[in-house]
Amino acid sequence: FDARKEEDGNMLSKLQGGDSDKPCGAFVVQAQKKSMAEGVDDADSVEEFIKSRLWMMPSLEDRDKKLVAPRLARAYDALDSQDQDRMVQHFDSLPKIYASLIKMDQFAFTFSMQAQLAADLLGDPDFVGNDLQVNNMKMGLGLRKPSAEFWAPVGKLTAAMAPEDKVNLLSYIVPRFGSGDASQDEALEAFVSGLKPTFAVIRSKCPAMDESDVQLLGSELLASEVLKPGRSTREEFAGWLGALNEVDLEFILTKRKSFKTDAKEELAKFKEEREMDEKRVEERREKIQEQVKAARENRSVIFNPRTGKMEEVEKEGFKLPF
């Protein structure tokens, strides 16, 4: 009910039984129900729209919602309108994703990495959250025994990659499963069978390159060119890779790593801005506390809960009436 309405008497007076001198026996909170956003009005409303969609997912911790919402917003912005609609339709897959992620070691696979994987998966138009995709995600994360024909060799050949890069690769691969398309199955087979020869070519052209970089560069070149049907055949990819020299490969690797460098700089800037905001809030809180303290020391009236009235404070020898 609305405590402010005056029809047939104020609701608070009804709770008091009509006796204004009688202490009120109820604690009333005036609130307004917040409705779920129905759509995205502009670029600034994307994150709020996504947050409202997460309200009805009690299986997700509040911590996870705070981490995944901004990442989902960035993934949403990167899609065209048709893929954006498909992404929203697949939001219901989030609880299934997190049901697996919460089983991971939180030190080796941080909450931030979990949120990034979830956002990357939902941001892929081919991810629908079916059982085959979820099972392959579990195998890629090591939560199920890896398949001998795919996940076992992928895990072995990319063992030197950084955890963040493995998460990124996983988000490329998982949506390719469960399509029922024979050409997609062939592309997956071409990817896994092409890892070892691709790494060998890169090592021969860049003998000084770290093994982790060899695996990062080779797996992502394969993922971008071979993993999706219709882009490059094995022969076309092999010919293109063979034509690249050391400078070309180093340039591609540097460009790939620049995303991570830029992200770290943006994170540092965000933390600095957040610290400044927290400092301003703390300064305002201290100012309010000083004002409250001054008001208490100089107040002339006080509320008496026994009578339910405001009573004048006697400056000399005043004692609280309760």
Image: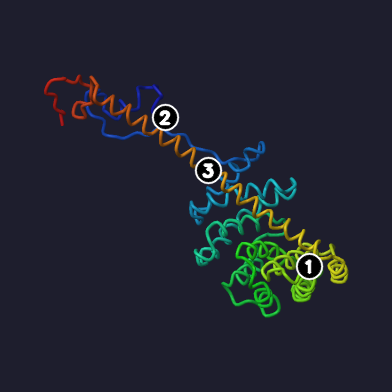
| Number of the label disc, if any, that sits on residue 272 | 3
As drawn, is 260 to the left or to the right of 245?
left
Residue 145 image offset from top left, x and y in percent: 60, 77
Q: Position of residue 237 (x, y in %)?
A: 84, 68
Task: Using the numbered discs, state the Cα–Cα distance from disc 3 to disc 1 in whole angstroms.
Answer: 45 Å
Q: Looking at the figure, which quarter contains the N terminus?
A: top left
Amino acid type at mark 3? Glu
Q: CA distance from mark 2 to mark 1?
A: 59 Å
Q: Dot 2 lies on which element?
A: loop
Q: Nearer the viewer's eye, disc 2 or disc 1? A: 1
**Residue underneath mark 1:** 184
Please state if 63 lies on the left or on the right of 169 as rendered. Answer: left
Q: Badge 1: few (under 14), some or many (20 or more) residues near its Cα, within 10 Å?
A: some
Of the residues shown, which amino acid type is indicated by label 1? Gln
* Residue 188 spot, x, y in % from top left: 76, 70
Horizontal placement of 265 versus 244: left or right? left
* Residue with the mark numbered 2: 2
Whether label 3 touches label 1, CB < 8 Å: no
Q: Earlier in the sequence, mark 2 or mark 3?
A: 2
Would residue 167 appear left or right of 253 to someone viewing this image? left
Q: How far across and how far down the image is residue 60, in percent?
A: 51, 55
Residue type indicated by callout 2: Asp
Residue at the spot 53% in from the left edge and 45% down from the top edge: 271
Q: Quadrant of residue 256?
A: bottom right
**How far is mark 2 from mark 3, CA to CA?**
43 Å
Give whichever of discs 2 and 1 has the lower sequence position: 2
Q: Is residue 42 above or below residue 6?
A: below
* The C terminus sits in image quarter: top left
Q: Is residue 317 in view from this perspective?
A: yes
In this rendering, the answer to whether 55 lies above or below 205 is above
Res 185 seen here: no
Q: Secondary structure at mark 1?
A: helix
